Amino acid sequence: MRIPLVKPWRAFEEFDDLSDAECHRHVADAIINYPWLGRVPVLLGLFTLLAWPIMWAVLADLGAIPRWIPAAKSAEWIGIQLITTTLLVPAAIYWITRDLGIYIALRLSLRRGCCPKCGQSLAGIPIQGASLEPNPANHWVRCPECGKKIMLLEHGITPRDLVPWELRRADPNLGHLRERSAWRGRRGSGKKNENS
């Protein structure tokens, strides 16, 4: 298993062919699907920001700072250490838990499109029953590995989960092309009105 230090999405081979901008879009989708993973780092960072000075004050009151914590003897240096660690420790906890939350959200998103019995990826497998009935409760796929018939609605699998990750891309100029053509149409109609 790969353990990237900066970009947690690089731990998954499914994102190897995608750019960082496309990976950011998939991360945003994963956090929308699992919003608690986006809130936990913020709550832990705020809790640490509030609890850290209180812990230092309690330890200073007990006289345990010079014995248990490697700190300077003078009150000024203890104050400087308190200020710097109050800023650095909550930030480090936020960044670590944020990256861990992104990793868990992406892993859960990737597992949504897998067979619940054997874990085989179902990406690219055609949906059965779609042409027969419009009812989504009757749509299913068959796992190519174990042969299990998987009802999509029962397992919370959407048709988008079965689309391979490399095919989920959208052209970044899609909206811009439409805007340009609409602007040219308006510009051309204005010239026609001036001539008439």
Image: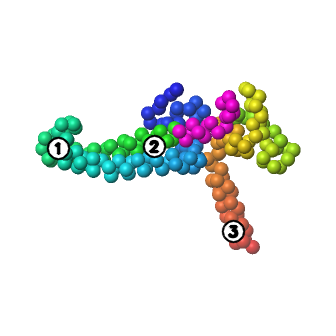
| Amino acid marked by disc 3 | Gly
**Residue 41 at what x, y percent from top left?**
44, 46
| Amino acid marked by disc 1 | Gly
Can you identify the residue that label 1 sits on?
A: 63
Please tell me how crowded label 2 is: few (under 14), some (14-19), or many (20+) other residues with Cα within 10 Å.
many
SS at badge 1: loop
**Residue 6 at what x, y percent from top left?**
44, 36
Q: Is residue 107 magenta?
A: yes
What mark, if any, has residue 129 been given in the picture? none
Can you identify the residue that label 2 sits on?
A: 98
- Residue furthest front in the image: 62
Res 190 visible: yes
Give the magenta-colored segment's residue range: 104-121
Do the numbered discs 1 and 3 sit on residues whose CB atoms are within 8 Å? no
Cα separation, mark 1 vs mark 3, equals: 81 Å
Cα separation, mark 2 vs mark 1, equals: 35 Å
SS at badge 2: helix
Point out the frontmost of discs 3 and 2: 2
Q: Residue at x 66, y 30 (%)?
A: 119
**Residue 135 at what x, y percent from top left?**
81, 49
Point out the frontmost of discs 2 and 1: 1
SS at badge 3: helix
Q: Residue at x 68, y 65 (%)?
A: 186
| Amino acid marked by disc 2 | Arg
Question: Is residue 192 or residue 58 the one in the foreground?
Answer: 58
Q: Residue at x 73, y 45 (%)?
A: 153
Instruction: Point out the tag, 1 or 3, that comes first from the N-terminus.
Output: 1
Residue 53 located left or right of residue 127 = left
Can you identify the residue that label 3 sits on?
A: 190
